Image (cartoon, grey):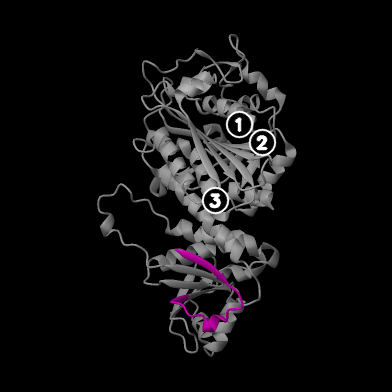
Amino acid sequence: MNYQFQAEVQAAQAQADCVVVGVYKPNELSAAAQELNTASSGAITEHLDLGDFSGDKQRFSMLYQLPGVAAKRILLVGLGERDKLNLDTLNQATHMAALTLKATKVSQVVSFLTEEAAQAAAENAVRQSVIAVADTLYSYNDFKSNKEDIPAPSLESWTFAHQTDTDLAAATRQGAAIAEGMKLCRDLANSPGNQCTPTFLAKTALKLAHSPANLEVEVLEETHMAELGMGSFLSVSKGSEEPGKMIILHYKGGKEGEAPVALVGKGITFDTGGISLKPGAAMDEMKFDMTGAASVLGTLAACVAMQLPINIVGVLAAAENMPSGKASKPGDIVTSMAGKTIEILNTDAEGRLVLCDALTYVERYQPSAVIDIATLTGACITALGHHTSGLLSNNDDLADEVLAAGKQANDEAWRLPMSDKYQEQLKSNFADMANIGGPPAGAITAACFLARFTEGYPWVHLDIAGTAWKSGAAKGSTGRPVPLLCQWLINRAQ
């Protein structure tokens, strides 16, 4: 799909298979719709007078070959009440338009929907609308044998047009880059565990390094990790025949010597729970347990496309958590890279075991800020559901930055508390700490565990267990939190 932006476009003169305009409730025309109505001698108001469509949200109406209008089709999309318009409404309207046109023979679209956003929100509106179109058109068919029988959408180009003199081409390019990053994240997460192994993630990262950008990749093998003392990480990967990998990506878009920001992703390519075996129901969804790592790859791919002027270190802690004769057992004690000993009370709390060594390792780059991203706890789903990611942090300013970026990107997080009171739950009679703190406040105690390895830098933990994928009929990766991470990096780069 080709996304572009054009300013000073007259709706009636736009050359396209379809022009998309908004209608407010009740029957109030947007500026672009009003121009089309004037050019067509009132054809739109005549259509609205029939009463079948009045501007309600989640409703649309298609008109064909209006006199005085260059486009072959006009798609009217409901925006609801004008005084309640927000970016979420515009995203829903764009999604509705893309979903409708996906089933037609339309190839070229000119949409005036983002023109309805307030001037201060125009950049966000365009970025998010690009993502909304890409999300609507996304499909994953790599393992279907009849791919040639699956009809491809006719859509080839989507132009975001404004009648006023404004320049949002950069925001459009950013949106397209973020959408591509989300696609990479989703493709990886949707891949089955027998394809998307730690080795596959490493190969994917190395392919990114071949792109024309300041991106370098190194892969730590288990022998190297043993030399570094990553006993916590290796306690997870040793149960599988698939070797674990610590994958490090260096994006050097900023000034030489400038402290990087770091993104650390949990990459458990399949999680059986280990000896603490999970129930069989819905265990197939544990292929999504590497979405943190996939989101780091997707975010860095987007940064490469945007050529953001910032230095980034991405670390993927990739392993498979399996039960075997070599697997860790409840009660085992391991030593982390930081030298701290951990009593493994539950082998299904493995994400924090790979992340803690990755968070220790990343300190060598003297990062200005670190975000780890992990599908870490079911407790976070209980607390926040499937709409909002959990956020915990040791630094208020960084937490505020990330929360603000999430709101901008329509990829929100919510901050949970993380005081020393919760650390008490991680006490162990036999080691420096246990890897679980019991059922109460499970998402918080998981972050408290990680916090013990992040004392040397500002740090945010994102628990995306509830937002990384959908279940049921719409089962699949969401691509989150790539939009949040990209927006945070865009803000930082500026």
Residue identified by numbered label 1: 362
Identify the secondary structure beneath mark 2.
loop
Please report the residue visible at 65 percent of the width from the left and 49 percent of the height from the top: 405
Q: In the image, residue 324 lies at what x, y percent?
A: 36, 19
Instruction: Return the residue nearer the eye: 181 or 304.
Output: 304
Q: In the image, residue 422 lies at what x, y percent?
A: 67, 24
Q: Is residue 86 visible?
A: no
Q: Tell me how far mark 1 sits from mark 2, CA to CA.
A: 8 Å
Circles 1 and 3, Cβ within 8 Å, touching? The answer is: no
Q: Is residue 21 above or below residue 267?
A: below
Please report the residue visible at 61 percent of the width from the left and 24 percent of the height from the top: 449
Dot label at residue 367: 2
Instruction: Return the residue nearer the eye: 178 or 199.
Output: 199
Magenta residues span: 1-18
| Marks 1 and 3, the one that precedes in the sequence | 3
Circles 1 and 2, Cβ within 8 Å, touching? The answer is: yes
Identify the secondary structure beneath mark 1.
helix
| Marks 3 and 2, the one that precedes in the sequence | 3
Q: Tell me how far mark 1 sits from mark 3, CA to CA.
A: 21 Å
Instruction: Return the residue nearer the eye: 94 or 432.
Output: 432
Q: Residue furthest front?
A: 256
Residue identified by numbered label 3: 304
- Quadrant into which the N terminus falls: bottom left
Instruction: Return the residue nearer the eye: 322 or 73.
Output: 322
Please report the residue visible at 36 percent of the width from the left and 39 percent of the height from the top: 192
Q: Amino acid at mark 1?
A: Val
Identify the secondary structure beneath mark 3.
helix
